[in-house]
Image (cartoon, rainbow, N blue to C red):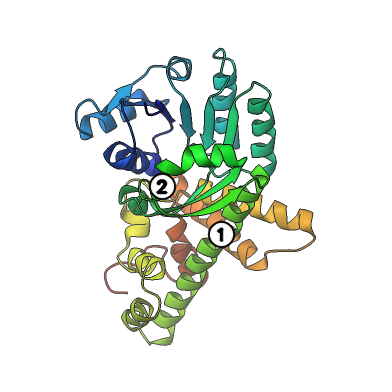
Amino acid sequence: MAPRILWIGLGNMGRGMVKNLVEKGPLDSPVLVFNRTKQRSIDLSNSLPEGKTEVIDSIAAGVSKADIIFIILSNDDVVEAAVNEILSSGDITGKLIVDCSTIHPDTTTRLAEAVTAKNAEFLTAPVFGAPAMADSGQLIGVLAGPKSAVDRARPYFQGVMARAEVNMSDEPYGKALTLKLIGNTFILNMVEQLAEGHVLAEKSGLGTKYLHQWVENMFPGPYAAYSTRMLSGDYYTREYPLFTVDLARKDAGHAMSLAKAAGTRLKNLEVGDEHLRQVKEHAGERGDIAGIYGAVRKEAGLKYENGEDS
């Protein structure tokens, strides 16, 4: 009989991951879903085939029924709070906790020690990809921890929630988060470069449409997608950000702290983080990482919003 799954966290990424889990995963029973805002759990459950999910009212109620517990939450504090609820829920001997969140390596190491002290297994499994990739099962998972834990979790990643995986069996838990944070610096630097390039293209008279055509042909995929988000105005018109400015700055802060501890600097990231600070100042909670374009525009004497004639 397949293990029973509990899923904690239904943000932009979590919803898509659960969708693929129930559609393609090796399951014999409904996925237990929990979110602090219960309506999110209800809405997700209603959007999926009947009987594929079960909405629960508390983490403790789900832990008592589950064999494997997936977590994907926004920051270190809320992940730690969720793990503490799991630890205080009763006997967790033999259960596997899989944390897909992006947090500091030191945090995940501390949580792993607390979980394994309770005779349960822990796995760090952050994922690379945007919400659209989560919806389509095209994420890249990074799995670190004891091989036994990795082997228990792998049936739910490649071919189900992910298109590929980086297998770090028997590596320290923190290595997966170090890779995730360094990888996320590439994304922020990509957004920064696109923003600077489009502003220069506009102000030099070249025009953004020609640079965008070049990006589409030279760098199809994430570069082209972010370029489209910038030029279409999606970075300031959407109601809910795809990659919130607060999460982007959290990741940048963790990466810069890793660099400092290692005796180096991420100077490109420092520039991007300053622009993210300006995005938060301008847009508040609606600020999105792609809003770096607006911040660079303002520095160049343009409006934050690009309008229809850019």
Q: What element carries label 2?
A: helix
Residue 75 point in image, percent of width and height? 55, 39
- The residue drawn where x is 49% and y is 63% is 295
Residue at position x 23%, y 25% in the image: 51
* Residue at 37% from the left image edge and 65% from the top image edge: 230
Query: In the picture shown, does residue 12 fall above or below 272?
Result: above
Residue placed most toward the observer, 135 or 123: 123
Q: Which of disc 2 and disc 1 is earlier in sequence?
A: 1
225 in relation to 70, above or below:
below
Q: Which mark is residue 286?
A: 2
- The x, y position of residue 189, in whole percent, is 54, 66
Is residue 202 left or right of 152 when viewed as pictured? left
Q: Which of 88 and 245 is in front in this view?
A: 88
Task: From the top left corner, tell me how far across and down residue 66 is, in percent.
Answer: 44, 22
**Residue 271 quadrant:** bottom right
Q: Is mark 1 on a helix, strand or loop?
A: helix
Q: In this view, does 245 lie above or below 202?
A: above
Amino acid tagged 1: Gly
Q: Furthest residue to the top?
A: 90
